[in-house]
Image (cartoon, rainbow, N blue to C red):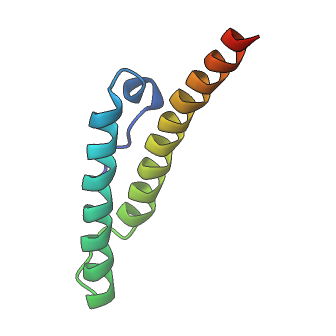
Amino acid sequence: MGVTVKPSELRGKSEKELAKHVEELKESLFQMKMKKAAGALKQTADVRNTKKDIARILTVLKEGTYAEDKGRKSRKQ
C-alpha cells in the first residue's frame, strides 16, 4: 500500500468504481490483519492507512447520496 487516496481523485469516479475499490481495500485489510496477527506484517501502519482510505471513499459516496437527496427535496417544493 503506502499510497493514500485523495478525495479530489475519488470524486471523479463513478459509484460502481468506488464500490469496487472499497471491496478491494476491505479484502486487502483482511489480509493485512491476518499477517499482523501472525507477526508477518512489516508495515503495520498500512492497516491504519487502509482503514482511512476506506473511510474516505465511503465519505465521498455519502456526499453523492446527500447531494442527490437534497436535489430531490428542492425540486418538490
Q: Is residue 66 left or right of residue 51?
A: right
For this rendering, which residue is in front, 40 or 59? 59
Report the quarter where the C terminus lies.
Answer: top right
- Outermost residue to the front: 76
- Toward the viewer: 6 or 18? 18
Q: Which of the 4 image quadrants contains residue 23?
A: bottom left
Can the viewer see residue 42? no
Residue at the image point whose x is 39% and y is 29% from the top: 10
Point 33% across, 38% down: residue? 18
Q: Position of residue 31 (x, y in %)?
A: 24, 72
Residue farthest to the bottom, as pictured: 38
Relative to the observer, which residue lies in front, 8 or 41? 8
As drawn, which residue projects farthest toward the right? 77
Quadrant of residue 38 within the rendered picture: bottom left
Q: Residue 5, how many percent across, how many down?
A: 38, 38
Q: Is residue 28 above or below residue 3?
A: below
Q: Residue at x 48, y 52 (%)?
A: 52
Q: Is residue 40 left or right of residue 46?
A: left
**Residue 69 seen:** yes
Q: Residue 49, located in which quarter of the rendered image?
A: bottom left
Q: On screen, 45 above or below 13?
A: below
Q: Is residue 49 above or below residue 5?
A: below
In the image shown, does 77 or 22 lie closer to the viewer? Answer: 77
Residue at x-position 26% and y-position 64%? 27
Q: Position of residue 9 (x, y in %)?
A: 37, 25
Is residue 50 shown above or below 65? Answer: below
Q: Across the whole image, how many numbered discs are drawn on residues? A: 0
